[in-house]
Amino acid sequence: MWRAILILCHVLVPGQLVQSPDELRTTITPQDCGLSCVRQGGPGCDYCRISSDDVNAALGLTSKNQFGTCLPWPCFKLLGEEDPGICNHYVQAPTDVTIEFVPDPEPKSDTMVVSWKPSQYGITFLRGFQVTLQPLGGFGVACQLFLFQKNLTLSVSHAQKVYKSEPFPGLSLGSDFAVTVMALPVPEKWEHFYRSKIFSTRSCAEKNGFQRCKADWYPNYIDVQQRGTVISITFNLAPPNLGITSYFSYCSANGKTTYAEMAPNTSRNQTHHTFELRDLEEGSNYTCEIAANEMDAVRKLFKFQFERRDLIEQLEEVKAQEEVLILSENQKSPRLLICYSSNDGPAHVNAVMKLAAFMQQHMATQVCLDLWDFLGLAEEGSMAWFCRQIQESDFVLVVCSWGLCCKGGTSAQGSLDSEVMVGLIGAEVGRAKSDGKDLSKYMAAIFNYSKETDIPTELGLVFRYKLPADLLLLFSQLHQVRLHTPGRYMKINNISDEDFALSPAGQALQQAISDTEEAMKENQKKILDSEEGGKEGNANA
């Protein structure tokens, strides 16, 4: 079975219990040694990083293995002739998987190290670990393989020791990754051999400091004051070391836009600048953006209402208070299964992945997505995996599109038929309704490029949302939070309308939705052109 992890027959022979220097350390780091040292069982190679060149040489591969040490070579293929029983040993998954960012002089990327503890169950048969790193919503997998020397057998006390990987460098800032640590060897029929963890690299501001990131900088202080018929806007200036000397702003209402450019005189004030807007329409709601006058600068979105002068004092007395919701790190995150169809093409699948990454990062939600659990899908099979996820998840969100209702089409859940997937969820909804249970577990959503008619009739009873406009409402359902109470409203950072598109994950989601909309328009144009060509051919005939 392909899920068996890469293990080398010459090193997976349990030896006698040997006292090693590892017994005296609580943290074990990889040693600079190779496969030959591991096979010989000599000193200085108790815990070795095995390179892809060593793997190729051991397996007799003449061409370069493009997957490096990631390729899961079958256990029985390597060990069956020499020791058939070695692949039947059960080694439990590692515990306490932790991510640690380490110093990296490169300002545009991050470097991290993975650490973990081995499980005490089956530890005497443990021969090493494989660490896999995969970007969420991206391509490419990085792997590191670690093996113990052949004469080393671990004792139960090693379950309290911390093992570390080598550094994983060059990780894009502000990106989401999934890291998986697997215990070796892995029997052909055993599913509890790995532990996964999803994490995000630091943003440029988190790693280097906000004052050193020109591309990420934007005014984080905006103050709007109305004095008669004039609006005064004050914002904070960029640090001098960024070299930003000019800014721009535009405000729109009722189809009219007011544009302004500012070149502040820093000899008067080095930290803030105030400019004025005139000739605005009373009683209008203005939406504004302000940013550095630089290419692709991050824009700060803000809104204000230009009031009639005689209503300003009255408005200040009844103005609703704003309450900012900050979620505690200890608060339990709901588990959400996202279902979708791949029939609408890779652009739609990418939009779903960006939605999952955004919800994972900014909506305090534990997202379950098939594309993030390829090992689980291969082990269980698409139907069993899908049914288990429905039962174990707190919520199920179906992202509806034209392809979801296409008969005979496939969802992305391990090539599960879309009609079968919708039928299963519809049956769960019907069963919950007949039992008098709450239907809030099940939800349907469409992106801007889809229609209400794309939601299957089987999901007619569930809550439905249009994204990204209804992200706040979706958050409210997931966390059972009231967004409005008398005299106040709830603002949720990175999800509210004014700052959704300011985070990297929000920008990525917005761009993916836009790209899918363009791709669908192009596809529809091709279909119409094809139909017109068919009609002309019939007429000429």
Image: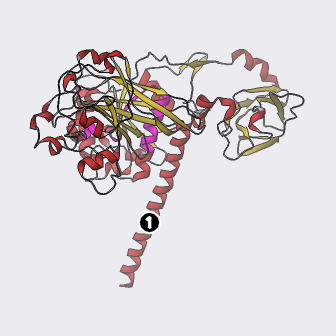
Q: Residue at x 41, y 75 (%)?
A: 533
Magenta residue check for 485: no
Can residue 231 be spotted in the picture?
A: no
Q: Residue furthest right?
A: 268
Please tell me whether residue 191 is drawn above or below residue 6 in the rendered image. Answer: above
Horizontal arrangement in the rendering, residue 460 relative to residue 15 (left or right): right
Q: Position of residue 486 (x, y in %)?
A: 58, 15
Local crowd at mark 1 within 10 Å, few (<14), some, or many (≥20)?
A: few
Q: Residue at x 43, y 20 (%)?
A: 480
Q: Nearer the viewer, residue 362 or 99?
A: 99
Kind of residue sitting beneath label 1 = Lys
Q: Residue at x 28, y 18 (%)?
A: 159
Can residue 392 be spotted in the picture?
A: yes
In the picture, the quarter occupied by the C terminus is bottom left
Q: Position of residue 91 (x, y in %)?
A: 21, 27
Magenta residue check for 364: yes
Report helix, strand or loop for mark 1: helix
Query: Of helix, strand and loop, which mostly describes the magenta segment?
Result: helix
In the picture, the quarter occupied by the N terminus is top left
Q: Position of residue 422 (x, y in %)?
A: 28, 41
Indicate how the structure is coloured in the image. Answer: secondary structure
Please tell me whether residue 352 is drawn above or below residue 183 in the rendered image. Answer: below
Horizontal arrangement in the rendering, residue 462 relative to residue 421 (left or right): right
- What is the span of residues highlighted in magenta in the rendered image? 351-377
Place residue 456 in its image quadrant.
top left
Place residue 423 in its image quadrant.
top left
Horizontal arrangement in the rendering, residue 133 relative to residue 186 (left or right): right
* Disc 1 target residue: 526
Q: Position of residue 433 (x, y in %)?
A: 26, 27
Total numbered badges shown on the rendered structure:
1
Place residue 12 in its image quadrant.
top left
